[in-house]
C-alpha cells in the first residue's frame, strides 16, 4: 500500500509536469504560469526520498560500481535541487521590495476606483482579479483582451453584471494594447457623434432620422449606439436618413 501510494504521487507529479509543458501559455510566459506547479509540493517527498536513500546508501555501505554511480547521480540531483531552491529563494527575497510596491499600487488603484464611485469596470486579466479581491467584490470587473473583446472571464457572473451596467468604467494600463484600442474607438466615436450632434440641430434632419429608424432596424441600432457612446455613422444610415428627409409620414387612417 505504501509503495502504491508513492507511485500514485509520482504519477501525479509526472502528469502535472506533462500538462504544464504542453500548455502554450507556459511556453510563452513560464514564470507567470509556474503557479500551476505548486501542487508538486505534495509529490516532492515521494520523489526526493528514494534519491536520498540511494545517496546515503552509497556513503554508508560499500556498493558495486553501478550502485556507486547511481548514488553519485542521486546526490548530484539532490545538490542541484538544493542549489536551485536557494537561488530562487534569494531572488524572491531580493525582489520583495518590488512586490510590495506592486501590491501598494494595486491597493491605491482599488481605492481610486472606489472614490470614483465605480462598481462595474472593464480591465485586463490581472487588473480585474486583483481589483475584485482588493475591493472585496464591491467592484466587479469584466476581462477584455487587447482588442477590447471578451477575454478570459473565469466567473461569468462578473461579466454579465458589468454588461448590464449603465455606465461601466475602463481600468487599463497606459500604453497597453487595450488602452490604445480604446482611444482609437473613442476618437472615432467622438468624430461621428460630433457630426450627429451638428445634424441634430436641424429639426428636419431629426425627423428624417426618426422616419429612417422606424423603417430600418439597422438605422435604429446605429442611432441607439451613437447615443450610448459606442456607435458611428455609416453611409447606409446617412442614405436612409436622406430618404427620410424626402418622405413624409402618412396621416393615420380613421
Image (cartoon, grey):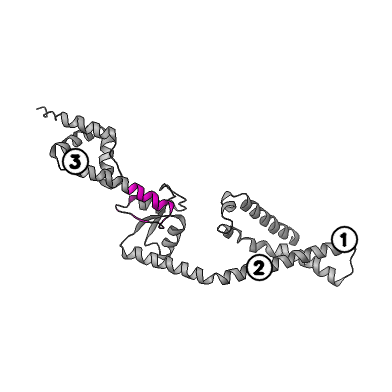
Write the residue at 72% across / 60% down.
6
| Apparent side of residue 142 relative to residue 39 in the rendered image (left or right) | left
Q: Which mark is residue 240?
A: none
Residue 217 seen in render = no
* Residue under pointer 1: 66
Q: Nearer the viewer, mark 3 or mark 1?
A: 3
Inter-mark Cα distance, 1 to 2? 29 Å
User: Where 147 falls versus 99 (above or below)?
Assistant: above
Image quarter of residue 76: bottom right
Quarter the N terminus occupies: bottom right
Outermost residue to the left: 254
Residue 252 spot, x, y in % from top left: 11, 29
Residue 119 spot, x, y in % from top left: 34, 59
User: Where 101 falls versus 235 (above or below)?
Assistant: below
Q: Earlier in the sequence, mark 3 or mark 1?
A: 1
* Residue under pointer 3: 199
* Residue under pointer 2: 85
The segment highlighted magenta reads 163-186
Element type at marker 1? helix
Residue 66 seen in render = yes
Write the residue at 87% across / 60% down.
66
| Apparent side of residue 55 relative to residue 181 in the rendered image (left or right) | right
Residue 179 spot, x, y in % from top left: 39, 53
Element type at marker 2? helix
Write the residue at 59% across / 69% down.
91
Amino acid at each position: 500500500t505504501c509503495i502504491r501510494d508513492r507511485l500514485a504521487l509520482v504519477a501525479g507529479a509526472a502528469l502535472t509536469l506533462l500538462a504544464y509543458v504542453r500548455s502554450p501559455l507556459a511556453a510563452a510566459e513560464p514564470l507567470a504560469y509556474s503557479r500551476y506547479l505548486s501542487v508538486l509540493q505534495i509529490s516532492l517527498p515521494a520523489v526526493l526520498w528514494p534519491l536520498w536513500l540511494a545517496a546515503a546508501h552509497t556513503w554508508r555501505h560499500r556498493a558495486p560500481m553501478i550502485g556507486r554511480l547511481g548514488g553519485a547521480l542521486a546526490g548530484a540531483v539532490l545538490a542541484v535541487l538544493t542549489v536551485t531552491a536557494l537561488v530562487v529563494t534569494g531572488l524572491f527575497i531580493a525582489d520583495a521590495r518590488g512586490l510590495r510596491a506592486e501590491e501598494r499600487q494595486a491597493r491605491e488603484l482599488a481605492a481610486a476606483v472606489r472614490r470614483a464611485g465605480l462598481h462595474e469596470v472593464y480591465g485586463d486579466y490581472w487588473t480585474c482579479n486583483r481589483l475584485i479581491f482588493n475591493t472585496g467584490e464591491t467592484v466587479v470587473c469584466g476581462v477584455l483582451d487587447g482588442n477590447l473583446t471578451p477575454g478570459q472571464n473565469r466567473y461569468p457572473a462578473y461579466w454579465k453584471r458589468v454588461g448590464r451596467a449603465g455606465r461601466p468604467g475602463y481600468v487599463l494600463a497606459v500604453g497597453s494594447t487595450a488602452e490604445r484600442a480604446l482611444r482609437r474607438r473613442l476618437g472615432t466615436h467622438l468624430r461621428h457623434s460630433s457630426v450627429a450632434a451638428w445634424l441634430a440641430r436641424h429639426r428636419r434632419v431629426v425627423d428624417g432620422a426618426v422616419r429612417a429608424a422606424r423603417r430600418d432596424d439597422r438605422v435604429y441600432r446605429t442611432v441607439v449606439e451613437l447615443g450610448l457612446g459606442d456607435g458611428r455613422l455609416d453611409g447606409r444610415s446617412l442614405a436612409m436618413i436622406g430618404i427620410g428627409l424626402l418622405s413624409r409620414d402618412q396621416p393615420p387612417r380613421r
